[in-house]
Amino acid sequence: MAAIDDFTHEPRVAYFSMEIALHNDIPTYSGGLGVLAGDTLRSATDLEVPVVAVTLASTMGYFRQTIDAEGRQAEQASPWNPSQWAVSLDAVVAVTIEGRRVWVGGWLYVLKGHTNGEQPVVLLDTDLEQNNPDDRAITRQLYGGDKAYRLKQEIVLGIGGTRMLQALGFELRQYHMNEGHSALLALELLRRFAYPPEDMRPGESPYNIPRVRELCCFTTHTPVEAGHDKFDYDLVRRVLGDYVDFPTLQHLAGEQELNMTRLALNLSEYINGVARRHAEISRHMYPGYRVHAVTNGVHPFTWTSEPFRRIYDERLPGWCHEPELLMRAACCITDAAVQTAHVEAKQRLIDEVNTRTGVSLAADCFTIGFARRMTAYKRPDLLFSDLQRLKNIAQRHPIQIVLAGKAHPQDGPGKQLIEVLHRHMRELDGVISIAYLPAYDMTTALTLVSGVDVWLNTPLRPMEASGTSGMKAAFNAVPHLSVLDGWWIEGCIEGVTGWAIGDDVPSTNGDDAGHLYQKLEQTILPLYYENPAGWVTVMKGAISQCASYFNSQRMMRRYASEAYVK
Ligand SMILES: *Cc1c(COP(=O)(O)O)cnc(C)c1O
């Protein structure tokens, strides 16, 4: 068993994230943010960038989704047992919450690369006998509870996590905040590096802000104001107390309320958005900060299905480490090899759908995939805006559809959308086969993105910061059909890597359904059914133009050379 001492001999980058998708069977993630965090660590492992990740143990997980015949989502607890996957840490640190001392222990999980390399992941856990029952529950439910619960979690993550790394003896070069949830870590550093009182003149701030800034970098993930964590100062005073003096806090985190994004922005030297457009929007939302663009990527090995791994291993050895090699896919891989691998991946999806839902899909039928967090701005119902039109399209060229996705338990409209989709499934019964796979997770995601013929994305512009599932599809030669938002603004070469729905102007969101139908009817379906050679050229375009670039090896190299260099 690995121990902490195996990892403390060299300086590391501390990577803080509220959620991390470490493994399919460890439910410490809810969706895109967690998967991205996991892929970031997997790439750090491949590229031997020494990091130590910090997250919450989330021992009750996020939730497991079941869906009844009406499409109503039910949520079950999704407990996991850290002792089966990780070793208990000896160190225990304390944070102050509501004036009480809350003890924070944890677990060491060792993330292993698929070929070599290991990275330590610290899973913080307050479920200790010394704590009262409420405090023991702080690290149980990912994104559960109310505002106060969330603030307590963020105190444990940011402050507890920073103290834990110190207690464990880590030497840290940088602190990377993956989203604002962990921004209290920067306040902890402010306190740690405060000037001693004897060095201060009357009226001077004791805090060495430049020193803290040099140590911190911050990745923001949300292009909508409402998506940023904010806390009333009344709540902050009650839960966190006078942790730093109030004028300083207001100065750094906002006059009216504690805005975690603003706090992270003010205390980070390097700041980035997760796609070019998202960085632009962030600069408008928070003027005065230099926001870089590091477009997200996905981890090559993790998101490539076995049939394609075999081809790449044979034709482009080294592709996992250096996915740029996939640029050569267009000429180095035969059409037949791509077609055969896709048929195999599609059959796996068909079998999975049949086993889990009873829906029979046909191997020779054009299959549309759509799966992601179910929430209003992602518009999962856009494809079903005009059922008659969809039926007409399917009469000329058969289609079938596979859907999946969970709605946050408190997202009423998101849950309703799952019901709406199920109603459309009934209405289209006998005309279009549609399956909804419950309990979307990493394994289901790989089966889906590799097994369908086109991957659909229909967010309301400009709300998709990046999106990553379309990049996973590209590794599996599945073209993307999407609104021009997030990464697709950079990835779309019309008719080469996939297709755009509508144009690049947010005010035209309203016509997206019409554009989607038109693109399917006039371009995509005729190409698929009438020009197989043309279709496989687009499949190869997805590999050579998208997978070669939109991967987390490139992303990690940029973080290592720009954000982690000080
Ligand atoms: C990749 C992934 C996501 C994120 O998909 P987006 O396209 O970014 O919405 C969410 N959930 C799971 C399980 C995933 O694998």
Image (cartoon, helix red, strand yellow):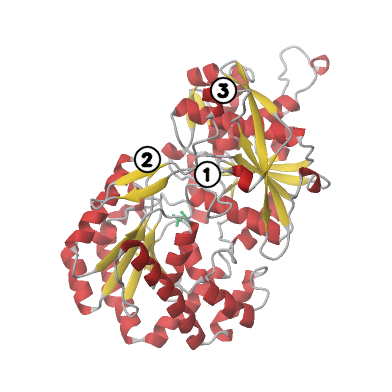
Q: Position of residue 436 (x, y in %)?
A: 32, 59
Q: Quadrant of residue 107?
A: top right
Callout 2: 10 Å neighbours few (<14), some, many (20+)?
A: some
Residue at 48%, 54% (x, y): give it: 466
Residue reaching furthest to the top: 202
Closer-to-camera residue (403/454): 403
Q: Which residue is mark 1?
A: 283
* Camera-side mark, 2 or 1: 2
**Left or right: where 352 falls relative to 513:** right
Residue in front for this viewpoint, 467 or 114: 114
Query: Label 2: which residue?
Result: 409
The amino acid sitting under disc 2 is Pro
* Location of residue 359 in the rendering, given as x and y in whole percent from the top left corner: 29, 67
Occupied quadrant, residue 248: top right
Sequence-wise, the earlier of marks 2 and 1 is 1
Q: Give, as a three-letter code, the residue at label 3.
A: Gln
Which residue is more in the foreground, 533 or 102? Answer: 102
Marks 2 and 3, how far apart at CA: 32 Å
> At 55% across and 34% down in the image, what residue appears?
139
